[in-house]
Image (cartoon, rainbow, N blue to C red):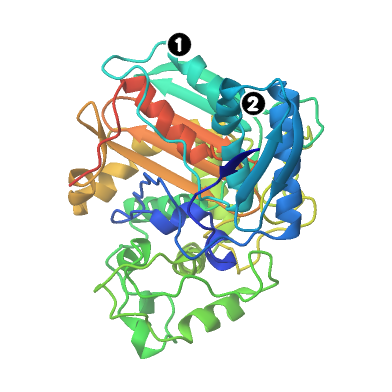
Amino acid sequence: MTSFTFEGAPACADRAVRDGAYRQCRRLLPGTAAFTFCLAACSSEEPNASPDAIARAERIYTECVEDELGIEIERLHIAANGDIDVVFGPDVGPDGEALALRVCEPRIGSVLEPGGVSVLEPPPNLGRLGSDDDLAALLESRSRLGFEGAIAIEFRGELRAVTGFGELALGSERAPDGDTAFDCGSIMKDMTSSVILLLERDGELSREQPLADFFPELPSAWRDVTIQQTLEHSAGFDAYHDTEGDFEAQDRATALATIFGKEPLFPPGSDNDYSNSGYTVLAALIEEATGGDFRSVVRQRIFDPIGMTRTGFYGEPLWDDRNVAIGRGAATHLDNDPARWPAPTWALMGNGGLVSTPSDLLRWSNWYTASGGLVDMLLEQMPEAVEDAPTLAANPVLALAGGNDFGFNAMVGAVFGDDTHVVAASHVLSPVTGEILGVEVLQVLYGEVLAEGE
């Protein structure tokens, strides 16, 4: 009997997983310029997979080994701690066993321990720019490892690829493409911050203003917190203000009362702690500053001018063609169809609920990073965000990401001053998320390992 043992990073608690396990190793730059270079998610004692997870893992492993690789399995048992005991057929030699280990075991890990496995590695074309063949080989290999989703790649102003892999939904004959709609998780925060920057550009507010200018009845502990501190997660807000998850029914008044009813986690401006609640505050502030509905303001100021015609919020009637990715992850809400999920409540407003496509996000990345655009405004006050950023070809890299435990993960990456943009979105829990693939594509394009900033 050949015994394999999976040894990945144990799963996060449900609450941490909710916004994507990558958050546990996420490095935050000032403002919204967050990049990730994560190799593992969390740490704890032995994993303890549920019976449902074990059954799913055994099914996925069997399908991978027998159907894809053509290798016979006589007996398979996966334990709750992640140990895999497998007996292959009599004709399977060491090469076959090694192939099963390399190709199929990572898929088991991603089911038993969501977010705990990474396949991120140096590009095979290290030292030279990536060719179309290099990109095709990377994408094909990551598809074999379980990536399902779509990607759009622009290198130095040239569109190199817009393609998809897998199925829109389990059993579907249709593959995702550049116009497929995906839940984008916390990339919504970057839309919220973009509106703040546009309002400042137009003289409607200043990031140095205190929140009390917009919410006169604030408790004293929050009155002097600035918009800038809220943008860069240094205001002291809790991570969440709901008790039931993203789809909790919550109105604006309840959300704000809950958020401001707590004491700051630390003196504002003295520390940094990632906060969804802070971006809900910013959504309410945008309504106060403009007199409009938050989602309508985002559409009027960003989506419509840029031409993001397939971008909106949960439940909007924008995707009647059903070109929508159905999530397959650690959790399920309704049918995991973001086009049919209920509209975001104030449990999620400003920090999530975004549905977009790789092609639309590519447009947004070009607009956001254009010379003289919003990023320049942001970095005028925070040059250290570029100084500390990871680099490729000596150019700073901006990578924004979002995800959840319904299977979705998305990444927008841009190389400053080099007109390079990569958008990758996935909708199936796998060792290869959109975020991991996006970083790998950037590395193949440049033939370099993404170098972390100082």
The crowding category of the residue bearing disc 2, from other C-alpha atoms within 10 Å (few below 14, some 14 to 19, many at least 20), is many
The image quadrant that residue 126 belongs to is: top left
**Crowdedness near tag 1: few (<14), some (14–19) or many (≥20) residues, C-alpha within 10 Å:** few
- In three-dimensional space, the C-alpha distance between marks 1 and 2, rounded to whole angstroms, equals 17 Å
> Would you say residue 167 is visible in this rendering?
no
Please identify the quarter of the rendering in which residue 100 is found: top right
Residue identifier under label 1: 132
Q: Amino acid at mark 1?
A: Asp
Q: Is residue 239 visible?
A: yes
Left or right placement of residue 326 versus residue 196 in this view: right
Image vertical order of residue 35 relative to residue 244, above or below: above
Where, quadrant-wise, is the N terminus in this rendering?
A: top right
Residue in the foreground of this view, choosing between 197 and 422: 422
Q: Are marks 1 and 2 in contact (CB under 8 Å)?
A: no
Q: Secondary structure at mark 2?
A: strand
SS type, badge 1: helix
Residue 200's disc is none
From the viewer's perspective, is 155 left or right of 428? left
Residue 47, position in %: x, y? Answer: 57, 60
Kindly identify the amino acid type of the residue bearing the numbered disc 2. Answer: Phe
- Seen from the viewer's position, the closer of residues 25 and 105 is 105
Residue 32 vertical placement versus 309 (above, below)? below
Which residue is painted at 54% across and 41% down in the image? 303
Instruction: Classify 3 as above or below 419.
Output: below
Q: Position of residue 275 (x, y in %)?
A: 44, 67
For label 2, the residue is 165
- The front one of 114 and 192 is 114
Residue 334 versus residue 120 in the image, above or below: below
| Residue 388 on image: x %, y % | 21, 47
Question: Which is more N-terminal, label 2 or label 1?
Answer: 1
Mark count: 2
Where residue 72 appears, as percent x and y from the top left, is 75, 26
